[in-house]
Amino acid sequence: MLQRYKNAMEMELETQLQKYLTTQDTIPSERCIVYSLDRLGFFAEINLMLAVLAYCFSNNIRFFLCDRNWNHSVKDGWHDYFRSLQVTSLSIDNADPKIRLKWQVARCFAPMSRISNGIINGSFAGVEVKSLSLTHEILESRFSQVSTEDGLIRFVDLQSAFAQLLFRFSPKIMERVMTRVKSLDLMDRRYLSVHIRRGDKILENPRIESAKFIDCIEALGIEYDAIFVASDDFRAVEEIRRARPDWDVKTLVLPSKTGHDQPTFNKLSKQEKLEETLLLLTEVYLHCQADYFLGSISSNVSRFIALNRADGKSTISMDHPAGSNVEPYFSFWNNNHKAVQAEAA
C-alpha cells in the first residue's frame, strides 16, 4: 500500500483549508460562489468543484455547494456519499432565464449582490450574472500560484489538498466500500492498480490498449503480490488475464460491462446509479491505496486519483495530452518505455 506522510507545510495547509471550510460564515455574504453539481460524470463534477474551491479559498470567497440537480443524488445528494461540506438550497433554478441559459456551459454562478473583483456584476434576484466570465477566470487560475499563510504554492496543490480533505465517505458508504475491498484480500498485500477507461472516453481521446499497461508494469521491475484492474469494459480485464495468465489479477468489474456511456447512465434509476457509483468509489479507494497506479491523465477518474495520491513518482499516465494542470502529479509513460515525471509534485 502507498505510504504517504505529510510534511509540516502540507499539514499546515490542511489546517488552513479546514479553517476556511468551518468559518465561511465570517466571509461577507456578497462574496460568494455557488457550485451546482449537475449531469456530468461523477469525477468530472468533483474535479471542477475542486478548482472552484481552490479559487474561492485563494480569493477569500464563500463557497456554496448545491446538489439538488445532481445526477448521482439518491436521497441526500452529496451526503449520500460523503460526510464533508455543507450544502445550500440556493439553486440556478431560481435565477433569471438568462443565467439558466448560460448555465448550460458554465458550471458556477454568484447568487448575491456582487463579487468585488469585478468578474461578477448582477444579483440572484434577476440581473444577469456573467457566469461564463467567472468560469473562464477559474479555469485560467489553475496554472497560477496562490498566496497562503506559509507563502506561495501552486493552485493545483490546493486542488490536491482539497481532494484529500473531502474524499471521506459517509459511514454507510464506507461500510459498503470496505466490504467489497475486503473481498479482494488486497489491503495487507503489495499491489499495483490499473484504470483503463474506454466507453465514451475513446470518442474524445485515442484508445489505450491493454498491452501498453502490461509493458509499463513489466518495465517498472518492482515486486508485487497482485494487480487490481478497474475498467468500464470487462474486455480490458480479460485481455490482461489472457496475456499474462500467471499474474494474480483482481477486479470488481462485472462481465456485463462493455463501456461507460454517460447519457445511458443518466437514464438509470436512482438505485442503479447508487450501485454503479458505489463500485466506482470502491475502485477509486483501492487506486488511492495502491503502491503504484497506472491510468490516463485524459480521464477525470485518473486525474482525481492523482490529486488524492499526491505522489507523482508512483502515479503513471499512459497518455500525455497537453493542457492539464495536474501534470505535476503524474509520471508519463513514453516511447522509450520509461515512466518520466514531468515535475516533482
Image (cartoon, grey):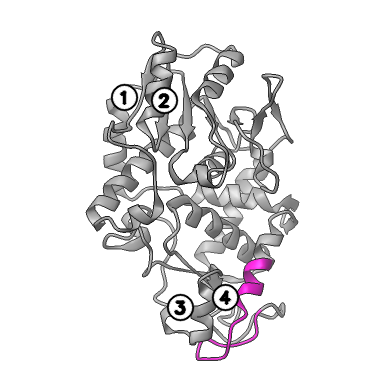
Disc 1 versus disc 3: nearer the observer: 3
> Can residue 187 be seen from the camera position used here?
no
How far separated are the C-alphas under marks 1 and 4? Answer: 44 Å
Q: Secondary structure at mark 2?
A: strand
- Viewer can see residue 266: yes
Query: Which one is in front, 2 or 275?
Result: 275
Label 2, on which residue? 228
Instruction: Give me the residue at 55% from left, 52% from top.
Output: 162
Say which label, 2 or 4, has the lower sequence index.
4
Mark 3 lies on residue: 92
- Labels 2 & 1 near each other (Cβ < 8 A): yes
Q: Which residue is mark 4?
A: 32
Amino acid at dot 2: Phe
Q: Of 78 and 171, which appears nearest the observer?
A: 78
Closer mark to the observer between disc 1 and disc 4: 1
* Label 4: element kind: strand
Check residue 184 in the rendering and tell me which mark sits there, or answer none: 1
